[in-house]
Image (cartoon, grey):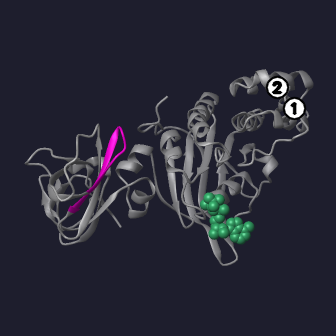
Amino acid sequence: MSNDGAAIPPSSARAIQLQGLTKRFGETTAVDAVDLEITDNELFFLLGPSGCGKTTLLRMIAGFIEPTGGRILLGDRDVTAVPPNKRNTGMVFQSYALWPHMTVADNVGYGLKIRKIAADERARRVTAALETVQMEALAGRKPNQLSGGQQQRVALARALVVEPSVLLLDEPLSNLDAKLRLSMRAEIRRICKGAGITTVYVTHDQKEALSMADRVAVLDRGQVVQVGGPRELYERPSTRFVADFLGETNFLPAVVKGRDNGAVVLQTPAGILRSTSAPPEVEGGRAVLCSLRPEAVRIGGPADGNRLAGSMVSSSYLGEVAQHVVALPGDLEVVTLELNPRPFGPPGSEIALTVDPDQVVVLAE
Ligand code: ATP
């Protein structure tokens, strides 16, 4: 199941709307006038560094934190003043918060019991939820007899069993080891898309967001900086913050010389570069910053392309890939990645780099 590309048809219904949503704690503005629309069945990520306000935003959607201003709509219903248990949201916490004295089945069925669902209906729904997360065989165990990944699945089943209209996940993989995190990424996406449920997922891990999300909102200091699909955000970041937060990149200062044949011509201290990835408002004479991903900077390449001449500073052999640091005129250094690396030249050897105009991203700010 791919998450690469525009996954959301434009006609989809809006499951969640946040309008001017704001939360202040004393002097701190944790969430600052956030506007977002999340569509039905979407797996939507809130991504940002520690303290950017993502947990506060998620908890306001759940109803655990009261907004200072703005509105929250679930479907067409304004729930801003509605208590958490009347919002029909399901939440999975970082800690899973399973009851230690209850079996897996009782943990999952607890929410149905307090909703006074009859025992036979309850049993049927618990079994279905445990099947969804592939935990039906361990229904009789207690949480301390489960691995971290299994506890994670139980927490998901417990949130799904009440058939919430919205599922809210707060860093759900943070307690798992690295290998399990990787396999659970695909698993959670499978479960959420399979259940057809609108999901909001909070993380500070950009790889988690890129690999799982339909769309991502990148947050910085309480504000949404950019919203888009994984490829769009990685390949077309609009700001330095987004380019930097979503992976390794090289920043090159440049001055816009003008436009030529649909490309923006840039004078950098290392030479001329052409870009077909510049925002339309970029004008001649303006000082800008370009972002070049290390994997977009190639060694060699066509002589008539976007070419920069430099000298090798250092190389690290990493097996399937090598990382080279190359010095460029103007006291600049760029990092390049070479897949299936050939033997390196010694430090100081001359080297030509090329980069596709499509991959020279001119940042708006
Ligand atoms: P993390 O990834 O570290 O959990 P986050 O992006 O989820 O961070 P929040 O927990 O939403 O960030 O916090 C956003 C800001 O609001 C931070 O500056 C935090 O210190 C502040 N904050 C959060 N909760 C409270 C509170 N109850 N009282 C005062 N300040 C708070």
Q: Main secondary structure of the magenta part?
A: strand
Q: If the picture is divided into quarters, which one holds ligand 1?
A: bottom right
Q: Which residue is mark 1?
A: 103
Image quadrant where one finds the C terminus? bottom left
Front residue of this view, candidates 139 and 365: 139
Q: Is residue 198 above or below residue 363?
A: above
Q: Position of residue 334 (x, y in %)?
A: 27, 59
Q: Which residue is mark 2?
A: 139
Q: Quadrant of residue 269?
A: bottom left
Asked which secondary structure carries label 1, the reply is: loop
Q: Residue furthest left?
A: 304
Q: Position of residue 250 (x, y in %)?
A: 31, 59
Q: Is residue 251 above or below residue 295?
A: below
Asked which secondary structure carries label 2, the reply is: loop
Q: Quick check: marks 2 and 1 in contact, CB under 8 Å?
A: yes
For the magenta stretch, what is the residue range?
314-327
In this rendering, would 273 be left or right of 121? left
**Mark 2 and mark 1: span between their CA atoms?**
7 Å
**Type of amino acid at the residue the image marks with label 1:** Thr
In this rendering, would 205 be left or right of 88? left
Q: Residue furthest front?
A: 346
Q: Which mark is residue 129?
A: none
**Type of amino acid at the residue the image marks with label 2:** Ala
Which one is earlier in the sequence, the residue at label 2 or at label 1? 1
Could one spot residue 68 in this view of the protein?
A: no
CA neighbours of label 1 inside 10 A, class few (<14), some (14 to 19), many (20+): some
